[in-house]
Every structure is written in C-alpha cells, then in structure tokens.
Image (cartoon, grey):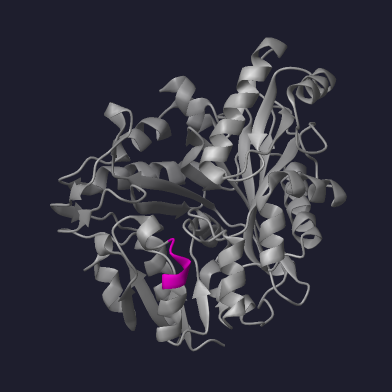
C-alpha cells in the first residue's frame, strides 16, 4: 500500500481524497493555487505546496509544478480527482515515467477512451449498442451528407475529443448540415485542439443513464449499478439519482452488463463511468466512458455501501477488489443535488463572494460533501460548485421528501445558490413521476 499520496486537485474532491487516505493510514500532500491559499482543508493534509497563480492554467494544470510538488513531498502516487488533469493521458504517462503511480487507468486506455470515435469502435467490438452513425471521422461535407442520408435526419454532430456539450450541433435538415458542421469543428478546435467530428442519429429527448464501474489489475470488473443524470442544463448535470426510476429490471441488468463488457474490452483498471442515452422505448446506446471518478460518485456509494475513493487507491496499488459482483446490491434510493454559487433567477450567473453564515442540514440518511464554511470566500476562478447535498432513504418518494426538507434547512448567507432551483425541480410533477429527460429543465424552466 502507498505511504504518501499527492492530491492533484482542489475543493471538495481534494478533501474527499484526503479523508479516504487518512482512514487508510496514508499520508497526504495537498497542492493549492494562490486563489486557494488558506483554504481550511489544506490543514488536514500532512503537507501543502503552492503550485502557482489563481487561474487553473497557472497552477492546477501545470504538469511540471504538480510533478515537482510530488517529488518534493516524496509521493508514491497521485490522485487526480475529477476535472483538471484527471483525464489527461500525457499527465498520466508523465507520472508513471517519474515512477509515481497515477490513481486511474493506464494512459493507453485513457487515450483510446478519450477519443469518442475510437471508443465507439471499442463499444461495437464489445457488443455494446451505439447510436447509428458514421463509422469514423467525417472528412468533408459530401461525406456528412451521405451518412446523414443513410441514418436519416435529424443528426447530431459531435466532437471526437472533449465533452461538456462543446463541439456538438444538431442538424434538422440537409440545409442545416454544412453550417452546423463548420460550427462544431471550429468550436472543437478552439476548445480541445482537435477539430475531428463524427455523425450520429439524433435521439430526441433521451434519458442520460450512466453505470459506475471499478476494475482491478487481476481481471475483476464490478459495476455498482446505474445513476440517472437526466436533470441537466446545457449538458451540465444538476441532480443525479440511483437507481434510475421507471427503468425495467431487464434493461437495468442489460445496461450494467454492457458497461462491464465495455470496460473489459478497453483493458481498463480503476474506477470509471460508462455513459448511455436511453430512448422512450428503453433502448440504450453507448455515449462515452469517463476515465476517472465523477462528481456524483457518492450516489453510488450510498446505495451500495462501497467507498469508491478507497477502492480506487487499493486497486491502483495492485491489490484485488475486496468484493465481487455478487456482493454488490442496490439498497434504497439516493439523490444528489449540486449546490452551486449561482443565481438561477439571472440565468445561473456565477456568484462568487464571502459566505457570511452557513447552516448545514442533517438527520438520518443525509450527507454533505463540501470544503466551504462560514467565512469562506468562494473564488471566481474555478467551477462554481460549493457542495453536494445527498440523501439516502428506503424509497424514491422518501428521498425526495428528505431532500426538500434539507434544501429548506440549508442556509448559505452572503451569496446566491441553486438550492431554490432544486426545490422547483423536485416538486415538479414530471420529476415526481420519474418521466423526465435531458431536455426537461430547459423545456420546463
């Protein structure tokens, strides 16, 4: 087992990893930018090093400075968390070349899965359903028109690199195709340095269902059931829950089995998420693999009782998973609301600033994952999430009722948050009935 781990991240995920390491008896090294200097969670690490200026490209994304901090701190391994360098295959490779373990998949697996076009080919090889579309990257408008004619309009143009909805456009007709193609390529090139795009049949109003997996280096691959992430805005998730409601048992089983096949095909080790869209007839199609831990991982932890961060560390160190698929059951219902420092009444405008007072909800089945406190100043330089409010109750109805109560209890004075918006979503009849899709928020609110 490792003796010292550097946490190459900030905020709540850095704190989450530090806590897991402490329980495993592992010393931790934190890094911070000038924008995070003085953050309370840094005191919980055994050492902490400043790696640069307030902006992430001056600090958390500086590979040489992160590696230097790891070497000065004598780290055995680096945990990247999510975001920043978590899915950077080059950083992964640099860590290993410096004889520092990267707590995540092999660089080759990460690189292949990071390219959505390559990942689609791997999915086909693993007999995992993919949305009908081009066999490879689209080279020109003529080819795009040919593929679109074969699969039928509307079509979705997608960047092969990156994510977060960037480099994506819908073309309703052939007349729309050329402009949509150029716009997607330009956005992808600007965002990811890769203008490669491919075409898919556009699936209207789907659900977004993902499967949490973890695999060791001894051939064991286990899924921790599925999460429904359909409550999203502009491709950014707002509320996640497990299990996915109104999903037939045979579909749940099939989608989880497909995720395991995908991970085996990719020779993937460590935690990851296989993402799917599900249409109104419960047909599911592979979207991508997120080769890292995700923001919403606590949802799966609550329904299975498995500590994903600890097990990430265990399998990265070469040990076998301490459980098999037969040991994993999905108990009760869990919901996570991402609490962001944003004003939902002003088009979700970011609201950095000082938290004057903070009242955190409690009670049976309530979890609050956050690094903030009364007196903390939310910086304007990073993602606006200040915490994750989770509940776990025997039924979905009870989970919704508990979450509403917790959102009423939560008080974050001095800044605006998205808590009030979550209450509107949770009390909407469509959400209560479990009939939402990925366009629910934009269509309804």
Tell whether position 292 is magenta: no
Determine the residue positioned at 62% across, 34% down.
207
In the rendered view, would you say 443 is above or below 70? above
Determine the residue positioned at 48% across, 64% down.
81
In the rendered view, would you say 114 is above or below 136? below
Relative side of 421 to 100, left or right? left
Determine the residue positioned at 57% across, 81% down.
98
Magenta residues span 61-65
Tell whether position 62 is magenta: yes
Rendering quarter of residue 203: top right
Total marks drawn? Answer: 0
Work out whether residue 270 or residue 239 is closer to the camera in this orientation and state it.
270
Whole-percent x, y for residue 334 in the image: 50, 51
Whole-percent x, y for residue 8 in the image: 44, 69
Give the quarter of the figure containing the N terminus.
Answer: bottom right
In the rendered view, would you say 251 is above or below 313? above
Work out whether residue 26 or residue 169 is closer to the camera in this orientation and state it.
169
Relative side of 299 to 59, left or right? right
Dominant SS type (magenta): helix
Whole-percent x, y for residue 347 in the image: 33, 28
Give the quarter of the figure containing the C terminus.
Answer: top left
Whole-percent x, y for residue 117 in the image: 74, 43
């Amino acid at each position: 087992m490792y003796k010292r781990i550097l946490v190459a991240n900030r905020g709540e995920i850095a704190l989450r990893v530090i806590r897991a390491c402490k329980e495993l008896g592992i010393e931790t090294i934190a890094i911070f930018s000038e924008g995070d200097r003085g953050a309370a969670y840094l005191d919980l690490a055994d050492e902490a090093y400043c790696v640069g200026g307030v902006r992430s490209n001056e600090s958390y994304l500086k590979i040489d400075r992160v590696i230097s901090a790891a070497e000065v701190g004598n780290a055995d391994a680096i945990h990247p968390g999510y975001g920043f360098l978590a899915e950077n295959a080059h950083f992964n490779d640099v860590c290993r070349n410096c004889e520092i373990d990267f707590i995540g998949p092999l660089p080759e697996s990460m690189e292949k899965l990071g390219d959505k076009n390559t990942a689609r080919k791997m999915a086909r090889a693993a007999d995992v359903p993919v949305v009908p579309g081009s066999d490879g990257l689209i080279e020109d408008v003529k080819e795009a028109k040919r593929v679109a004619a074969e699969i039928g309009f509307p079509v979705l143009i997608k960047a092969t690199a990156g994510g977060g909805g960037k480099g994506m456009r819908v073309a309703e007709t052939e007349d729309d195709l050329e402009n949509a193609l150029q716009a997607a390529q330009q956005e992808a090139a600007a965002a990811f340095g890769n203008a490669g795009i491919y075409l898919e049949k556009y699936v209207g109003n789907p659900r977004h269902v993902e499967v949490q997996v973890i695999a060791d280096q001894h051939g064991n691959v286990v899924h921790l059931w599925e999460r429904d992430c359909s409550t999203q805005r502009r491709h950014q998730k707002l509320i996640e829950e497990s299990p996915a409601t109104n999903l037939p048992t045979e579909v749940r089983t099939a989608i989880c089995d497909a995720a395991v096949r995908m991970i085996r095909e990719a020779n993937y080790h460590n935690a990851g998420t296989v993402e799917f869209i599900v249409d109104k007839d419960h047909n599911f199609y592979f979207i991508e693999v997120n080769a890292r831990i995700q923001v919403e991982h606590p949802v799966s932890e609550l329904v299975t009782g498995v500590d994903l961060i600890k097990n990430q560390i265990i399998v990265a160190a070469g040990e076998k998973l301490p459980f098999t698929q037969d040991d994993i059951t999905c108990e009760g219902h869990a919901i996570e609301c991402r609490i962001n420092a944003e004003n939902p009444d002003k088009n979700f405008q970011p609201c950095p600033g000082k938290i004057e007072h903070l009242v955190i909800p409690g009670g049976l089945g309530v979890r609050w994952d956050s690094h903030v406190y009364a007196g903390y100043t939310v910086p304007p330089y990073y993602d606006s999430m200040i915490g994750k409010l989770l509940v776990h109750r025997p039924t979905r109805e009870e989970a919704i009722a508990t979450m509403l109560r917790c959102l009423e209890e939560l008080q974050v004075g001095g800044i605006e948050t998205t808590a009030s918006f979550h209450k509107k979503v949770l009390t909407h009849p469509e959400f209560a009935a479990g009939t939402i899709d990925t366009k629910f928020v934009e269509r309804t609110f």
